[in-house]
Image (cartoon, rainbow, N blue to C red):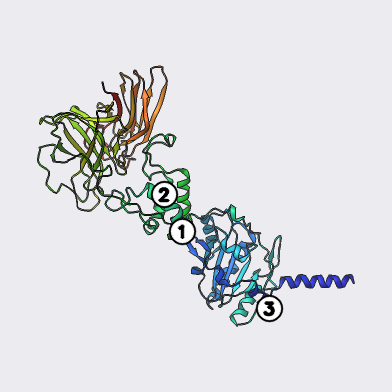
């Protein structure tokens, strides 16, 4: 009786290990249910399994980076892919380790000599549908899509054991049967590889898609510059446009070069106009690109932003545009200044007259370039109302500064900037040719306060005009400071250097002997910006505001026009400047 029970038990176990063709169909193993599973190619492109598996007989093989049994079977599977591939069989290898980097998988497959399609099942979608258990399991589908065999390649290798050669060629025999139109004798075996770790669905990283995750980030942070006619070199207003630049986007985001915001990370959250991406947003973009930039559901796309080519502050009360060249007083052509297609353009200066007979108070203002894609930045200054030679030392006020991506300057109620009677406005423009013919006539629009303000917004400057940067110096320091003779509140800072500028700091030295670092900017001549406090920051009388900067005049600086020459103060790009302007508030008596 005991022997009979053992025989029956053995038969039952054997029966459980061998599945008939009808049982496979009854189990819902039709290949079509796998088609919409999303996997990654070794290049990181997200693909549907049905789009890469092809038609005809298909073998899906599993592998695992670092699994020794998988490595031993790799040459055999490569050989099978060549032998049976010539007879129309397609092989696809899948790796489903939840923490295996795609780059590591690519390296492993290259070392193993795998020459057929390899996919990363990053969300284990295909693995769940197949019910795969180990890293050596194979799945054979016939030309009609029915699963005909699953299990081991053969019986040569097992955990801790190996035969000199296989005695049961399961996969090869099953392939011969399917190609001959027969059912394999054996339809299921145990595959003795490393066990696959299948994570609970809730622990898998949620798929990051353009529609749901990336498009809103790009709209908020990139479109302001990356749209037609703006300074961004390419548009980012659609999935197709973003996908075309995906790897570049991931690179500049990871390096925090885009969106351009040069304040050091320790000042994150301090300024109202900051443009940096939060850590979570950067991680989403990097994951999206690494996962192959999946599209997502177009129905989930955010509504397109409606951009205007006109004034964002509304219709101005007055508009002042470039009227004539500063030097020589020659009128500007009606069509505007012709920006050359190529080369470096020295700073250009133009004049506009205001002709007001009394002071006016500006509540908000906006600079509107005539050719935004080549206007890098604009500085508008206020000068005395005379027709004498231009003298930079006779600047009455810095009126407005504009860099790509900036928003209009809007002062709180009760705050305003004075426009003196009869003042001349001088526009300083930095043009960056982009190979296209462009004509520019930049304008500044202003909205006047309806009532006399309580506080006057004044722009002051900390500067050093007496420095000399030695030839080849890679970290030359320049300092300047200003003493605050009365209590005041500062609204914003704007550092300015030229192509050798490396960094710029503002430091407050208080009357009680304490110090506070107000800003550290990793300076970039190609992206200069104003740093605006969320609320005016008060400083007591007797505070010294110090500006500290460093210049790289070495050959290692790719923007350095002449590393073999010492450099002094000058307005042109090949010269240098060290100016830290700041907006502060005065009570109007």
User: Helix, strand, or loop for circle 3?
Assistant: loop
Image check: 456 left or right of 84?
left
Q: Looking at the image, how many numbered discs can be counted on the residues? A: 3
Q: Which badge, 2 or 3, comes first in the chain's sequence?
A: 3
Viewer-proximal residue among 548 and 53: 53
Give the residue drawn at x 10%, y 42%: 331
Look at the picture and state if 285 lies above or below 350: below
Of marks 2 and 3, the one in the foreground: 2
Of marks 2 and 1, the one in the foreground: 2
Residue at mark 3: 185
Viewer-proximal residue among 218 and 469: 218
Q: Position of residue 558 (x, y in %)?
A: 32, 43
The reply to whether discs 2 and 1 touch (Cβ–Cβ < 8 Å) is no
Give the residue drawn at x 12%, y 43%: 332
Residue at mark 2: 217
Furthest residue to the front? Answer: 451
Q: Mark 3 packing: few (<14 Cα in 10 Å), some, or many (20+)?
A: some
Q: Which badge, 2 or 1, comes first in the chain's sequence?
A: 2
Residue at mark 1: 294
User: Helix, strand, or loop for circle 2?
Assistant: helix
């Amino acid at each position: 009786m005991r022997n009979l029970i053992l025989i029956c038990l053995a038969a039952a176990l054997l029966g459980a290990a061998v599945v008939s063709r009808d049982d496979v169909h009854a189990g819902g193993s039709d290949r079509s249910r796998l088609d919409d599973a999303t996997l990654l190619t070794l290049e990181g492109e997200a693909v549907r399994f049905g789009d890469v598996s092809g038609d005809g007989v298909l073998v899906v093989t599993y592998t695992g980076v670092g699994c020794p049994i998988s490595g031993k079977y790799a040459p055999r599977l490569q050989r099978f892919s060549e032998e049976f591939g010539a007879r129309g069989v397609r092989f696809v290898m899948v790796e489903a380790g939840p923490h295996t980097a795609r780059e590591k998988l690519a390296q492993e497959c290259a070392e193993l000599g795998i020459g057929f399609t390899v996919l990363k099942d990053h969300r284990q979608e295909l693995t769940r549908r197949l019910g795969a258990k180990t890293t050596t399991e194979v799945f054979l589908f016939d030309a009609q899509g029915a699963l005909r065999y699953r299990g081991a390649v053969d019986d040569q290798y097992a955990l801790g054991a190996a035969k000199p050669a296989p005695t049961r060629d399961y996969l090869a025999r099953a392939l011969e049967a399917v190609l001959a139109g027969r059912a394999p004798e054996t339809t299921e075996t145990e595959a003795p590889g490393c066990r696959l770790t299948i994570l609970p669905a809730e622990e898998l990283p949620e798929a990051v898609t353009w529609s749901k995750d990336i498009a809103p980030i790009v709209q908020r942070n990139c479109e302001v510059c990356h749209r037609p006619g703006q300074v961004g070199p390419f548009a980012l207003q659609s999935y197709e446009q973003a996908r075309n630049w995906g790897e570049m986007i991931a690179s500049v985001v990871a390096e925090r070069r885009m969106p351009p915001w040069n304040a050091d990370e320790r000042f994150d959250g301090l300024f109202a106009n900051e443009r940096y991406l939060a850590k979570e947003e950067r991680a989403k973009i990097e994951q999206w690109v690494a996962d192959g930039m999946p599209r997502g559901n177009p129905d989930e796309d955010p509504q397109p932003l409606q951009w205007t080519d006109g004034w964002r502050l509304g219709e101005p009360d007055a508009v002042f545009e470039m009227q004539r060249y500063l030097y020589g007083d020659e009128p500007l052509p009606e069509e505007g200044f012709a920006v050359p297609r190529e080369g470096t353009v020295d700073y250009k200066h133009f004049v506009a007259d205001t002709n007001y007979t009394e002071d006016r108070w500006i509540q908000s203002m906006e600079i509107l370039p005539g050719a935004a894609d080549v206007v890098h930045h604009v500085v508008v200054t206020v000068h005395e109302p005379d027709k004498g030679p231009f003298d930079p030392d006779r600047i009455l006020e810095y009126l407005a500064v504009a860099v790509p991506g900036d928003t209009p300057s809007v002062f709180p109620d009760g705050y305003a900037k004075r426009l003196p009677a009869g003042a001349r406005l001088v526009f300083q423009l930095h043009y960056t040719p982009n190979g296209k013919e462009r004509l520019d006539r930049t304008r500044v629009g202003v909205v006047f306060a309806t009532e006399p303000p309580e506080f006057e917004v004044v722009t002051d400057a900390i500067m050093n005009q007496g420095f000399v940067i030695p030839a080849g110096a890679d970290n030359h320091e320049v300092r300047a400071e200003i003493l605050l003779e009365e209590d005041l509140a500062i609204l914003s800072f704007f550092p300015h250097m030229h192509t050798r500028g490396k960094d710029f700091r503002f430091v407050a030295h208080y009357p009680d002997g304490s110090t506070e670092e107000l800003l550290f900017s990793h300076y970039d001549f190609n992206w200069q910006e104003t740093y605006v406090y969320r609320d005016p920051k008060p400083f007591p009388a007797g505070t010294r505001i110090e500006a500290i900067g460093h210049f790289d005049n070495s050959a290692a600086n790719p923007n350095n026009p002449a590393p073999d020459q010492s450099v002094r103060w000058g307005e042109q790009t090949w010269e240098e400047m060290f100016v830290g302007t700041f907006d502060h508030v005065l009570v109007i008596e």
